[in-house]
Amino acid sequence: MLTIAMPKGRIFEEAVGLMREADFQLPEEFNEGRKLIIEVPNEQLRFILAKPTDVATYVEHGVADLGIAGKDVLLEEDRVVYELVDLKISECYLAVAGLPNTEMSTVAPRIATKYPRIATNYFREQGEQVEIIPLNGSIELAPLIGLADRIVDIVSTGRTLVENGLVEYEKMIEVTSRLIVNPVSYRIHDERIEEIVDRLSAVIERKEM
Ligand SMILES: Nc1ncnc2c1ncn2[C@@H]1O[C@H](COP(=O)(O)OP(=O)(O)OP(=O)(O)O)[C@@H](O)[C@H]1O
Ligand SMILES: O=P(O)(O)OC[C@H]1O[C@H](OP(=O)(O)OP(=O)(O)O)[C@H](O)[C@@H]1O
């Protein structure tokens, strides 16, 4: 039996929908309830429901063979896992944003973000030295109350920026969710995992036509 780490929250519904389209028989328990481990014996699969930022940790440690995680989390966490399929779900992007018509301070501008690693690398590549201010949520608050010059955050509909009077300065990285695998599991269960990859890829290709 293979174990798949599924991200609770935003990605969950789309991920379950995609698997069902690929003909995985997932029980009703996926639609409701608080169970964190769901076995699907007919499919020889066991699902664990994890926080999105923890999925790659479970997969790296081999307690889950496969997992579904946003590209943003994968870049930020830099775990030792292989990315197998771009599932093309939960699309959004990372952007630099801030108050309109404001210059960044010339000396170590302050960047508030949930993505310190991505932000550090991004500004380093631009040759800018910045001070990263790590936050866990409500990132848009930071420029509004003078904690930061800019934020690095996810944009999806753009509504949070607009409603808080912020503007996007630079698009950084397109984000979608990916199927990831533990490298050792991939070697041991290659045929079974390829079968799962093929089923999901067929659905994704069909949707793109
Ligand atoms: N508008 C969005 N905001 C944040 N993440 C989004 C958005 N749209 C898609 N995503 C994807 O969903 C993932 C985050 O999912 P979710 O918001 O459920 O997790 P979380 O940030 O850990 O939640 P929490 O609010 O509990 O901290 C991101 O890693 C990203 O890949
Ligand atoms: O472009 P939009 O569609 O408005 O979506 C983007 C917003 O959604 C996310 O926040 P989330 O809802 O996860 O809240 P939090 O990070 O503040 O907890 C993200 O951090 C942005 O604030």
Image (cartoon, rainbow, N blue to C red):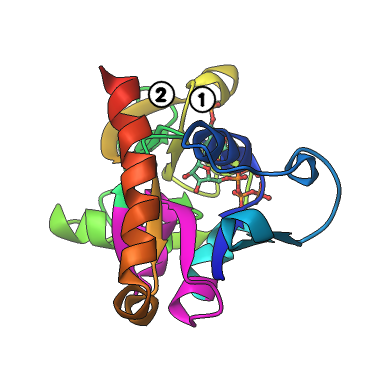
Q: Residue at x 59, y 61 (%)?
A: 45
Q: Quadrant of residue 97?
A: top left
Residue 49 lies, in percent from the top left, at: 68, 58
Quadrant location of the C terminus? top left
* Figure quarter occupied by ligand 2: top right
Q: Which residues are magenta?
A: 58-84
The answer to if 66 sits in the magenta stretch is yes
Q: Quadrant of residue 39?
A: bottom right
Residue 77 lies, in percent from the top left, at: 41, 68
Give the residue type at disc 2: Val
Disc 2: CA contacts within 10 A as few (<14), some (14-19) or many (>=20):
some
Tell whether 5 sits left or right of 76.
right
Q: Can you tell me whether the CB of the residue at mark 1 lies under 8 Å from the nearest atom of ligand 2?
A: yes
Q: Quadrant of residue 84?
A: bottom left
Quadrant location of the N terminus? bottom right
Q: Residue at x 62, y 42 (%)?
A: 25
Instruction: Decide: is 111 above or below 159.
Output: below
Q: Residue at x 50, y 35 (%)?
A: 18
Residue in the foreground of this view, choosing between 131 and 93: 93
Q: Marks 1 and 2: in contact by CB < 8 Å?
A: yes
Give the spatial CA distance, label 2 vs label 1: 6 Å
Residue in the foreground of this view, choosing between 63 and 196: 196
State the residue position of label 2. 167
Residue in the foreground of this view, choosing between 53 and 189: 189
State the residue position of label 1. 161
User: SS of the residue at dot 1?
Assistant: helix
Residue in the foreground of this view, choosing between 57 and 36: 36
Give the residue type at disc 1: Leu
Residue 60 visible in the snapshot:
yes
